[in-house]
Amino acid sequence: MIPDTIEKIEKKINGSRTISDEKKRELLKLVDELKREVLAASGDDRDGAQSVANFANASAHEALREIVDPRMFELARNGLSESVRRFEVTNPGLVSVVNALSTVLANMGI
């Protein structure tokens, strides 16, 4: 299920008409890192890791909409931050990549 969620994020990024090819490459690199980290974290907490993937998907969805609703994006991003919080000690790499992904999405002019 986590790989399916990550694939949805990749499709959203690749299909986006609102971001440059350079930004797509940057986001896809981060999503690849996210995939590795969230799969590693799923060994300890599968439900928690799935929540991280789901909120990453929601954040990407909101950030890549043609007309972005900043309030909805912020809600999704807050959910992502909360979902990854439980991994601060056990998987700091996951926390790091989620923070980087959130930063890139937030800096896209939202």
Image (cartoon, rainbow, N blue to C red):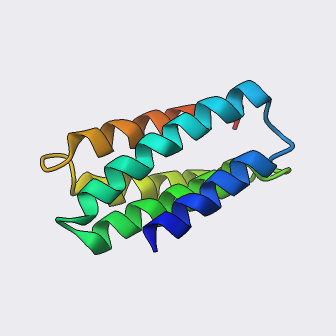
Residue occupying the far left of the picture = 89
Residue 81 visible in image: yes
Task: Judge left or right: residue 60 versus residue 102.
Answer: right
Across and down, in percent, residue 12 comes to: 71, 54
Across and down, in percent, residue 107 comes to: 62, 29
Above-or-below relation of 38 to 14? below
Across and down, in percent, residue 31 comes to: 52, 44
Name which residue lies at 79% across and 35% down: 19
Above-or-below relation of 29 to 68? above
Name which residue lies at 42% across and 47% down: 34
- Relative to the observer, which residue lies in front, 96 or 30? 30
Task: Judge left or right: residue 7 versus residue 96.
Answer: right
- Relative to the observer, which residue lies in front, 71 or 54? 54
Above-or-below relation of 76 to 22? below
Across and down, in percent, residue 27 comes to: 60, 37
Residue 71 visible in image: no
Quarter of image, res 51? bottom left
Indicate the quadrant containing the C terminus: top left, top right, bottom left or bottom right: top right
Name which residue lies at 70% across and 47% down: 13
- Relative to the observer, which residue lies in front, 68 or 33? 33
Name which residue lies at 21% across and 57% down: 86
